[in-house]
Image: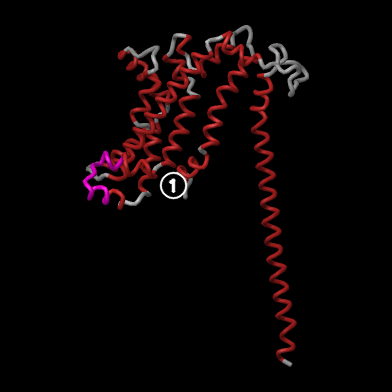
Amino acid sequence: MTQQTAQPGAWTGRQNKRSGDTWIKVREVLGRAVAYLLLTVGGLVLLVPFLWTFSTSLKASGAALSWPPQFIPRPVVFRNYVDLFVLAPFGHWLLNSMLVTALSVLGAILSATMVGFAFSRLRFPGRDAMFMLCVSTMMLPFIVTMIPSFILFRILGWIDTFAPLVVGSWLGPAFYIFLSRQFMRGLPMDYDEAARMDGATSWRIWASVILPNSGAVIATIGILSFRASWNNFMGPLIYLNTTEKFTLAVGLRTFRSYTSTNWALLMAGSVVMIMPVLILFFSLQRYFLRGMQFSGVTGR
């Protein structure tokens, strides 16, 4: 009798447990659906400016500010992208931006990984104090160093050259050094010890051991440096005077004047300028997220 009377209670407990598990799964599905819905809506909202820019780049010169606004251009004018290179030295600006960005990315990767390697893998007096001093420079805004930097570059005769736009990347940007140091600290020290037993120097360890295992942080530095240099406006505006030496960020400003603005050409140039950044980010997105995660920036 005791066993028979206990069975309904056990069955009821199992039923309640299944009901509870089902409710938990339903809540998880609903929560995930709401999260995806909010992310989709937010993504569409963020895409509106880019879609409007692309739409305006295909409109006629007088239809950009028409009322009511036309999201789909009628007619579609692809010649705006051709006129970029005909009516302005857009090709020179594009090549200048590519040159400055390539040199800046290369310098940032080499200098940041070198200094990050020293701070993370080598032991020398004052290492931690020097690292804290290096990181503290991130608190200095650009506006504080703008005038002293201009005076220095003028004394060196670098005004109206690309040198002021590139040399800073070759001196080890503090944030990139921080990323390199944090990432390399997570690599086993056994790599260094094994290489030193084979007679490798610190330079050889950095080039042949550490860099091949630091692809994630290299991609992260490359993306951040590319975006910063490609979109840099204040630097070229301050140091470049010749129109043919302008980069895209400053060159596009010439499509605007006090009396009129060619919105179609301005938006077409903006689309051309945006596309390399989008392509680079989405191509290396996995490495970028991994580099940020293992560098400790995400808090993990």
Residue nearest the observer in this picture, 157 or 150? 157
- Verify whether residue 185 appears in magenta: no
Q: Is residue 64 visible?
A: no
Residue at position x 47%, y 20% in the image: 97
Residue 140, picture quadrant: top left
Q: Left of 110 or right of it: where is 265?
A: right
Q: Which residues are magenta?
A: 193-206
For residue 21, above or below residue 140:
below
Mark 1: few/some/many CA within 10 Å (<14, 14-19, 20+): many
Q: Residue furthest front?
A: 198
Q: Secondary structure at mark 1?
A: helix
The image position of residue 78, as x and y in percent, is 67, 17
Q: Which residue is mark 1?
A: 294
Residue nearest the observer in this picture, 211 or 127? 211
Image quadrant where one finds the N terminus: bottom right
Is the magenta region chiefly helix, strand or loop?
A: helix
Residue type, numbered disc 1: Phe
Q: Left of 189 or right of it: where is 82?
A: right
Residue at position x 40%, y 40% in the image: 179
Q: Left of 29 or right of it: where is 171?
A: left
Q: Is residue 277 visible?
A: yes
Residue at position x 38%, y 19% in the image: 164
